[in-house]
């Protein structure tokens, strides 16, 4: 059906015959590769990658291009893309190929030589797929989607697309406020992706089989009626004189008023990825990752991921054991990452780590728990994790420097606990501790941040005392806080970058005020400006889309990379585009919202009760704490009743099988040791 | 359990009992792999295939894979070599097959022999390259090559991460011949068979820094102003010891075991 031309952009399809639409563009791309940096990232061919041949392509009703809108080295390890890639490719009626953002050096050559945006698997033009699914973990990838659309010859604006263009679908955590991207994406998938991609495939397949009745609008209407799918173009937004939203109304009677997120019920039913992609190029995470549970009810008030992925659903011990086994064998990775938002919180984490350490004893396979909490962490666990491999430093995230600010953000960690844990670690031979903090938190004063210095000093002192020598290190890593939708802080004013930068300057002084301790403390932080733009995109409404487009037209790319990010480009574009509408960058970021203001994402239902979020925001201002509902009674956040899914924690009474095998990492053609 | 001395790993690695030398190819789009990329791919393949590879000592043990002068990123090769230390004796033919299956297609293990003296490094002092030049007329290439061979010394400059380096291409050049596409090796891609694609075969002596195909083209530009309209595609066809007649002696010797594929 796709024989038409793409509008706008480089319109690469203008010169190609319809019958050649799905052929690889690799012959055109290849001569460009010796001229760009790290060409290996564009060639595909990774272990466990899947490429459909021409016959399969022709015979498959629904073809997906899955995009991670950042560089290959960041995008390849992304679990969301890897899971959906396998889930879709297992379906007989679907196929999926991957694409990533291309760096500006290749982008320029592609424009010059009229090579369209391509997938790395089959090097097929992105514009020839039925669905382009993009997963946004961060808002700073928005401009990169515009580059891909343009290079693919897909009109930037949804209103300019027709039946010959792919459905542009947005998912990932940023999808919980997709409004700044409303002009550019056709459909938004809210929540867990495993099941909704199947439902979307069914809808697209049926519509195509019927000959595409009603054109693109009918397809979008059908998708709008699919659980978890939001079609921004089918809603009208009106504004009040003060700049706030007056109302968000469905533009068609078939469209629901509010869209509820999808929730995958049983992770054990979805053991993906089974065969992780093994990159040829170097990437940010070189490991086999297994998600051990989803959701978090710790209730850290700044944490959007924790809020929007509730309720907690654990994978069983048996499920984890089988997934790790399959991933290690299929990949050859020598590190296994046990992923979740707070991995040490799994009800059977001790059994998991001990079982895996036993299984991989002597095989040079290491375990990692990428996110841990001081109070959920104990040294036995740390020692178990390091038993078969590298002993990197221990990482803790107290997030706030003072006891007071930690109550505000509901990160209930006492400094005593931290010092006790750290001392024990240093006593057992660990040499390095990393501490993560945020700056610019609601109600924060200089003193709250300066207390980080005192904490770091005490960590060094305790470390020296426990280890009996002076050679201990503490690294403090600080990020700027960005208020996010669907959290109690969605109403909070964001701190201005000048305030954040000044506090961090004072903190550095305080850290170095005692040279003897300060020289063992490293400090890492980025300037606060990108956080302000992230804040604009995170809590912006549809009007912010014009800013995104202007920044992109002026050359904005890879905004998550400091060497590409231009604050001036963003502030200039915000002034030019928002000023005439009576709003501003400050209005969207540093302004505190009122209780009754219509928020751009109010019609998107994450399961959390708005009233509960507001009460928790008030609780935060009063410094009140909120316990975890896994161990204390339900505090009625609303997620369980609204998703129809209770929290799901073990122990499950299952076992981590297989317990022992001759060679737990590879083949057995060479006998056993 | 034996006492662990300070600085030694808690679990001492088993000793190496056998060393095997492998020849492998890097082909097609995988020619864009850097040496580091290839090393990582082999380390993982060795694990997946269950090869009883020996490991270095220490807290982060590494598999013992020793490499010999890798072909530059972007060039293909039919003749890359590596040596693997093993903790148990294995059949080289089984190793070739198992490792080849565990590697992505395009990194292809071709043959293996049990190592014997002299060392691999002492068995290689020159490389033969085939350089495909799409869009370059054969006559122009012949003229440029003749001009280059007529010189005693042709120095080009290469910008490296550690600064500018002067490289005498002519000195390292043992021979250079031009063949037409129809009777050339045509290994890099099917495009080689396309008319108008001249192929240059050169043998270069191993020098420090090594003379790469790009440097040879640089020298042709210096002596004859030859600039290919599209990037050339180079394939390392062989490595070995240069004999008096200008041939390369096979570094794996005669008792090889080849893949049965
Ligand atoms: S509804 Fe209750 S039990 Fe469920 S996540 Fe919220 S607080 Fe926890």
Image: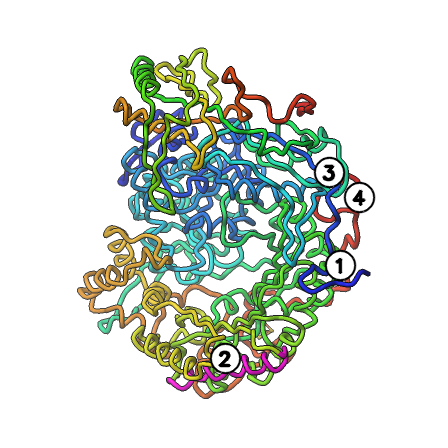
Give ligand 1's quarter of the image: bottom right
Using the image, name the chain to which the residue with label 2 belongs.
A
Q: Which residue is mark 1?
A: A358
- Whether labels 3 and 2 belong to a single chain: the reply is no
The span from disc 3 to disc 2 (Cα, nearest Å) is: 51 Å
Tell me, yes or no, if residue A640 can be seen here: no
Q: Which residue is mark 3?
A: B18
Residue marked by disc 2: A456
Co-location on one chain, circles 4 and 3: no
Q: Residue at x 54, y 79 (%)?
A: A460
- On screen, A136 above or below B79? below
**Residue with the most extreme right position:** B1
Q: Position of residue B63 (x, y in %)?
A: 65, 46
Q: Pick the quarter of the image with the C terminus of chain B.
A: top right
Q: Nearer the viewer, mark 3 or mark 2?
A: 3
Asked whether mark 2 lies closer than 8 Å to ligand 1, one says no
The crowd level at tag 2 (other Cα within 10 Å; few <14, some 14-19, many 20+) is many
Precedes in sequence: disc 4 or disc 1: 1
């Amino acid at each position: 059906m796709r024989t038409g031309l793409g509008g706008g952009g480089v319109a690469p399809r203008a010169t190609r015959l319809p019958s050649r639409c799905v052929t690889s563009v690799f012959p055109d791309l290849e001569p460009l590769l010796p001229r760009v940096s790290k060409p290996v990232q564009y060639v595909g061919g990774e272990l466990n990658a899947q490429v459909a041949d021409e016959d399969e392509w022709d015979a498959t009703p629904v073809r997906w291009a899955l995009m991670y809108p950042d560089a290959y080295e960041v995008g390849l390890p992304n679990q969301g893309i890897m899971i959906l890639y396998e889930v879709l490719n297992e379906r007989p009626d679907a196929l999926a190929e991957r694409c990533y953002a291309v760096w500006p050096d290749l982008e320029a050559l592609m424009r010059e030589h009229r090579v369209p945006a391509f997938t790395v698997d089959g090097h097929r033009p992105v514009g020839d797929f039925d669905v382009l699914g993009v997963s946004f973990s961060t808002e700073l990838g928005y401009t990169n989607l515009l580059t891909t659309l343009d290079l693919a010859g897909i009109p930037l604006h949804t209103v300019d697309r027709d039946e010959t263009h792919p459905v542009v679908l947005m998912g990932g955590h940023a999808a919980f406020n997709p409004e700044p991207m409303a002009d550019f994406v056709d459909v938004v998938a809210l929540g867990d992706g495993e099941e909704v991609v199947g439902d979307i495939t069914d809808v697209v397949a049926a519509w195509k089989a019927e000959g595409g009745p009603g054109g693109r609008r009918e397809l979008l209407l059908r998708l709008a009626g699919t659980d978890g799918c939001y079609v921004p173009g089918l809603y009208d937004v009106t504004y009040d004189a003060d700049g706030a939203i007056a109302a968000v109304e469905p533009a068609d009677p078939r469209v629901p008023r509010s869209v509820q997120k999808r929730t995958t019920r049983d992770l054990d039913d979805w053991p993906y990825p089974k065969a992780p992609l093994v990159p040829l190029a170097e990437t940010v995470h070189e490991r086999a990752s297994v998600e051990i549970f989803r959701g978090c009810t710790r209730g850290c008030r700044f944490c959007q991921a924790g809020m929007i992925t509730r309720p907690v659903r654990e994978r069983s011990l048996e499920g984890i054991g089988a997934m790790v086994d399959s991933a290690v064998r299929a990949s050859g990775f020598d590190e296994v990452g046990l992923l979740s938002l707070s991995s040490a919180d799994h009800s059977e984490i001790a059994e998991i780590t001990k079982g895996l350490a036993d299984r991989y004893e002597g095989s040079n396979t290491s375990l990692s728990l990428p996110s841990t909490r001081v109070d959920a962490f104990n040294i036995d666990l740390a020692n178990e994790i390091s038993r078969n491999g590298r002993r990197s430093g221990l990482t803790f995230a107290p997030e706030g420097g003072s006891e007071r600010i930690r109550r505000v953000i509901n990160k209930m960690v006492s400094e005593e606990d931290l010092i006790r844990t750290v001392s024990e670690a240093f006593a057992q031979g660990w040499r390095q501790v990393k501490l993560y903090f945020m700056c610019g938190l609601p109600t924060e004063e200089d003193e709250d941040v300066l207390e980080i210095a005192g904490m770091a000093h005490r960590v060094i002192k305790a470390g020296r005392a426990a280890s009996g020598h002076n050679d201990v290190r503490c690294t403090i890593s600080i990020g700027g806080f960005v208020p996010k939708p669907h959290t109690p802080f969605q109403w909070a004013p964001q701190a201005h970058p000048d305030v954040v930068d000044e506090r961090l300057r004072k903190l550095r002084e305080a850290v170095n005020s005692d040279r003897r301790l300060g020289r063992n403390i490293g400090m890492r932080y980025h300037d606060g400006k990108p956080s302000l733009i992230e804040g604009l995109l995170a809590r912006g409404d549809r009007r912010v889309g014009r800013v995104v487009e202007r920044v992109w037209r002026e050359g904005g790319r890879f905004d998550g990379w400091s060497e590409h990010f231009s604050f001036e480009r963003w502030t200039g574009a915000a002034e030019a585009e928002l000023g005439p509408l009576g709003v501003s960058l400050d209005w969207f970021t540093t302004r505190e919202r009122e209780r009754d203001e219509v928020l751009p994402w109010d019609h998107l239902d994450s399961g959390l009760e708005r009233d509960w979020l507001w009460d928790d925001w008030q609780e935060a201002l009063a410094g009140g704490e909120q316990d975890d509902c896994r161990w204390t009674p339900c505090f009625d956040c609303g997620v369980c009743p609204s998703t129809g899914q209770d929290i799901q924690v073990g122990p499950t009474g299952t076992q981590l099988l297989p317990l022992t095998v001759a060679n737990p990492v590879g083949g057995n053609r060479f006998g056993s040791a | 359990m034996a006492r662990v001395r300070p600085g030694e790993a808690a679990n001492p690695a088993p000793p190496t009992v056998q060393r095997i030398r492998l020849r492998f190819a890097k082909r097609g789009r995988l020619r864009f792999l850097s040496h580091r990329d290839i090393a990582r791919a082999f380390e993982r393949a060795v694990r997946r295939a269950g090869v009883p590879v020996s490991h270095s000592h220490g807290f982060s043990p590494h598999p013992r894979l020793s490499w010999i002068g890798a072909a530059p990123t972007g060039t293909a090769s039919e003749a890359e070599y590596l040596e693997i230390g093993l903790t148990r004796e294995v059949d080289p033919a089984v190793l070739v097959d198992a490792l080849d299956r565990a590697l992505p297609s395009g990194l292809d293990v071709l043959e293996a022999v049990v190592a014997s003296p002299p060392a691999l490094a002492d068995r290689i002092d020159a490389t033969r390259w085939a350089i495909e030049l799409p869009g370059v007329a054969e006559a122009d290439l012949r003229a440029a090559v003749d001009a280059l061979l007529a010189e005693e010394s042709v120095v080009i400059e290469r910008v490296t991460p550690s600064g500018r380096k002067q490289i005498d291409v002519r000195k390292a050049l043992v021979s250079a011949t031009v063949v037409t596409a129809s009777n050339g090796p045509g290994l890099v891609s099917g495009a080689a068979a396309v008319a108008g694609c001249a192929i240059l075969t050169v043998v270069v002596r191993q020098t420090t820094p090594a003379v790469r195909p790009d440097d040879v083209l640089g020298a042709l530009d210096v002596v004859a102003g030859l600039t290919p309209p599209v990037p050339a595609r180079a394939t390392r066809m062989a490595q070995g010891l240069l004999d008096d007649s200008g041939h390369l002696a096979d570094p794996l010797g005669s008792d090889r075991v080849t893949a049965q594929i």
